Image: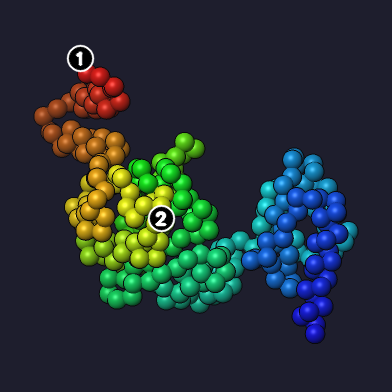
């Protein structure tokens, strides 16, 4: 009965606020009996400040305003409170699934892999740009577990938008396959409604390229400008008989060639 009264009180407060702020919408997925989470459409900081003062006059509830008031329940703080003594390397992902509406899928063996897809990432899946060019970037040796993090991004007019994040035990080809299979099985149409991207732009990694060919054989593979320039940089600086200034000059010329539309 007490729980129902709290819910009624919450709804009454929200209805009062919506009379003054018609764009105030409760985020029911994140609200609890102790805390109301609101999404607001505020025009400026002064309006937001007045909005917060209005909250204080009505209730002592710990409000969260998304535009100008920072979220007091930071992820790091809530995570530390939940796991004060540390935890198994896979438990944080279950925590994200429960508390942040994140889709979490596991491939649990010695070559474990975890797929993370947040609600904003899911909203990027139907975009037409998500089927064209997909950038796949991996970072190895993360934290004490030495795991590898791979993020998939679509190239849009507003910049790169994330589609999925994959965390894996190692950089071997089978572990890449395990991670990519999780995405293919759980979000088969994540590439703008297609079951594969048109082009995959990735690192110069034979394991990663082999896994991409195995999971999405229809996708063409290319190497991004950054990694081409990185390979040229390493090649130039591996030569001992060349002066330092010459190496820098040749590198600048190579970068200029990369962005030329035509070479005469």
Kindly give the residue lying farthest to the top in the view shown: 264
Q: Are marks 2 and 1 in contact (CB under 8 Å)?
A: no
Kindly give the residue lying farthest to the bottom in the view shown: 1
In the image: residue 34, left or right of residue 147? right
Question: Residue 136: x percent and y percent?
Answer: 33, 49
In the image: residue 2, left or right of residue 139? right
Residue 173 drawn above or below residue 69: below
Question: Residue 14: x percent and y percent?
Answer: 80, 61
Q: Give the residue at mark 1.
A: 264
Q: Nearer the viewer, residue 246 or 165?
A: 165
Q: Residue at x 43, y 44 (%)?
A: 128
Does residue 187 appear in this view?
A: yes
Quadrant housing residue 216: bottom left
Number of the label disc, if any, that sits on residue 190: 2
Kindly give the residue lying farthest to the left in the view shown: 241
Quadrant housing residue 242: top left
In the image: residue 170, left or right of residue 93? left
Where does the C terminus fall, quadrant-wise?
Answer: top left
Does residue 139 appear in this view?
A: no
Query: How far apart in space, not on screen, are marks 2 and 1 (Cα)?
Result: 41 Å
Q: Residue at x 47, y 36 (%)?
A: 157
Quadrant housing residue 106: bottom left
Query: Regarding mark 1 in the picture, which secondary structure is present there?
Result: loop
Name the front one of labels 2 and 1: 2
């Amino acid at each position: 009965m007490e729980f129902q009264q709290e819910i009624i009180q919450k709804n009454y407060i929200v209805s009062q606020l919506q009379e003054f702020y018609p764009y105030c919408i409760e985020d029911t997925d994140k609200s609890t009996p102790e805390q109301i989470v609101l999404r607001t459409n505020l025009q400026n900081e002064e309006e937001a400040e007045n909005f917060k003062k209005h909250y204080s006059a009505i209730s002592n509830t710990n409000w969260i305003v998304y535009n100008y008031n920072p979220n007091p329940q930071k992820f790091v703080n809530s995570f530390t409170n939940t796991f004060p003594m540390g935890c198994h390397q896979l438990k944080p992902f279950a925590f994200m699934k429960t508390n942040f509406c994140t889709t979490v899928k596991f491939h649990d063996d010695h070559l474990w892999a975890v797929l993370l897809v947040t609600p904003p990432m899911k909203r990027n899946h139907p975009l037409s740009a998500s089927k064209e060019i997909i950038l796949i970037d991996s970072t190895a040796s993360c934290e004490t577990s030495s795991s590898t993090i791979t993020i998939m991004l679509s190239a849009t007019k507003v910049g790169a938008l994330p589609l999925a994040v994959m965390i894996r035990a190692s950089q071997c080809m089978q572990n890449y396959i395990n991670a990519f299979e999780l995405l293919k099985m759980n979000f088969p149409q994540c590439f703008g409604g297609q079951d594969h991207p048109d082009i995959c732009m990735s690192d110069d990694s034979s394991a990663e390229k082999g896994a991409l060919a195995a999971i999405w054989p229809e996708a063409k593979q290319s190497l991004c400008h950054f990694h081409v320039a990185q390979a040229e940089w390493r090649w130039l600086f591996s030569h001992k008989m060349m002066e330092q200034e010459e190496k820098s000059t040749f590198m600048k010329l190579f970068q200029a060639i990369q962005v030329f539309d035509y070479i005469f």
